[in-house]
Amino acid sequence: MVIRTLASRRLSLRTPLDWPIVLLVLMIPVSLWASFDIRLSLPKAIGLLLGAAVFYATVGYVHDKERLIHALVLYFSIGAGVAALGLVGTNWLYKAPLLSDIVRRLPPLIRGLPGAGKGFHPNEVAGVLLWFVPAQMALLAWLLKRGHLRTWRGIAFTFSTLLTTATLLLTQSRSGWLGLALGLAVMGAWVDRRVRIVVVLLLVAALAVVAIKGPTWVGTVLFGGATSEVVGTLNWGFRIQVWKAALRGIGDFPFTGMGLGAFRRLAPVLYVLSVPPSYDIAHAHNGFLQAGVDFGVPGLVAYASIWLSTACLVILSAWHGRDWLRMLAIGLAGCLVSSFVYNLTDTIALGAKPTPAWWLMLGLIVSMARIIERGNGEGN
C-alpha cells in the first residue's frame, strides 16, 4: 500500500485497521466524483490521506515502550497546544454563568482563519480535547500513586492535564461534558468495584428515566428544545432534523455518498430544515451518519469497523497490560468512550483539520496493543 510505504517503510506491517482504512481510501475518488464541488471535497480528501499516513507513521515508529513514551510526549503536547489555542481562539458560547464570566475575560487573539472566521467552535474544541483528557487523567493518577509528580516531568504533565481539562470545561459543550463523564465512569468502573456498582445503578436509573419520559424529553433536557434557539444552541430539535436529513441522504446516495463535506451545502437544499438558508449546519451531528453521507454505506461500514476494532484492542490491552501500560490502556479506553458518546450528537468529520490527532490516537492504541501482546507489558 502506498500510504503504508510512505509512512512506515515497512511493507510487512499489518494492523487490524488495514481493511477499513483501505476501504476509506478507495472511496475517496468515488466521493470526489460524486461531489458537486471538488473545491469543497478535495481538502477533506487530503486531510483523510494525511490522517491515514499519521496512523501508519505512528505504528511504524512505535515498536517498544521507549518509543511509545516518545509518541505519547508528542501526543499530549499536541493536546496542550490545542487547549492553549482554544483559550485564545474559541468563539465562546455562554451557558453556565460562572464559566461564561471566565471566558468573557479571555482575549480573542485568533480570528479570521479559513473555516473559522469568528473563531473555533467550542463544541469542536471539546470534541478534540476528548481524545486527550481521559488518558491524561489515567496516567496522572498512576504518577500520583507512584509519587512521580514532584519531578519536572511530572509537574509539566500535571500542568498539561489541568490545561486541557480546564479548556474542555470552559467550552460548555454538553456533548463534550457528557462524553467526558461517561468516559471517566467507565475508567473508574474498570479499576474499582465500588465505582462499578455505582455506575451500574446510575445506568439503570438513566434507562428508567428514558423509558418513562422518553428519549425526546431526555434529549431536550440535555440539549434544549426551543425551535427559536436552533441557530444559537444547536438544540435537540435541530439535531433530529439533521439526523433525518442525513438518513435520507444515505438512502439517496447509498453507494457513493454525497461527496466529502457536501452534506452541509446539500441538506438545506434537498431536505426540509427549519434553519435560515444562509445557516451552515456544518455536518450531520453524528459521526456515523457523517461517514455515511460522505462515503455512502461502504464508508459507514469502514468507519464503524475502525471504532469496533480499536475498542477490542483497548479492552484486551487493559485486561492484559501491566503497570503504566494498563493505566494507559484504561485511559485510551476512556478517550474512545468519551469520543463515541460525543460522536452520537456531534462530530469532527473525517478529513477535518484536527483529525490527524485522532489518527495518532488510533496508532497509539494499535502500537500499545502490539507491545503488550509481545510480552513487553510486564514490569515498568
Image (tube, helix red, strand yellow):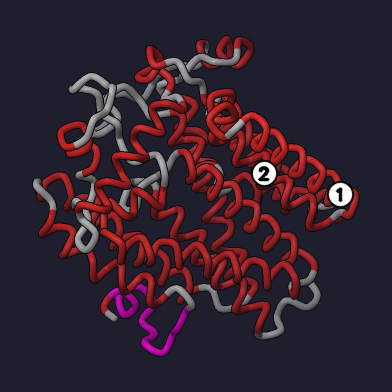
**Rendered view: 61 above or below 297:** below
Q: Nearer the viewer, residue 216 or 50?
A: 216
Give the percent coordinates (x, y) of residue 87. Answer: 49, 26
Residue situated furthest bottom in the rendering: 12
Q: Is residue 339 above or below residue 227?
A: below
Q: Where does the image place residue 278, in percent across and percent down from the top left? A: 19, 22
Amino acid type of disc 1? Ile
Q: Residue 30's image quarter? A: bottom left
Q: Quadrant of residue 176?
A: top right
Query: Label 1 to label 2, Cα distance in Å?
Result: 14 Å
Circle 2: residue type: Leu
Front residue of 258 and 155: 258
Q: Is residue 5 magenta?
A: yes
At horizontal 44% and vertical 60% (from top left) the residue drawn is 359
Asked if one can make out residue 150 in the rendered structure from this viewpoint, the answer is: no
Dots 1, 2 in contact, CB < 8 A: no
At a point 53% along the width and 24% down the height, the residue shown is: 220
Q: Which mark is residue 197?
A: 1
Task: Give the residue displayed 71% in from the left and 45% down from the top.
Answer: 184
Position of the N terminus, as image quadrant, is bottom left
Residue 286 numbered tag = none
Q: Which mark is residue 182?
A: 2
Left or right, residue 280 beside residue 196:
left
The residues colored magenta run: 3-15
> Is residue 310 or residue 141 the one in the foreground?
310
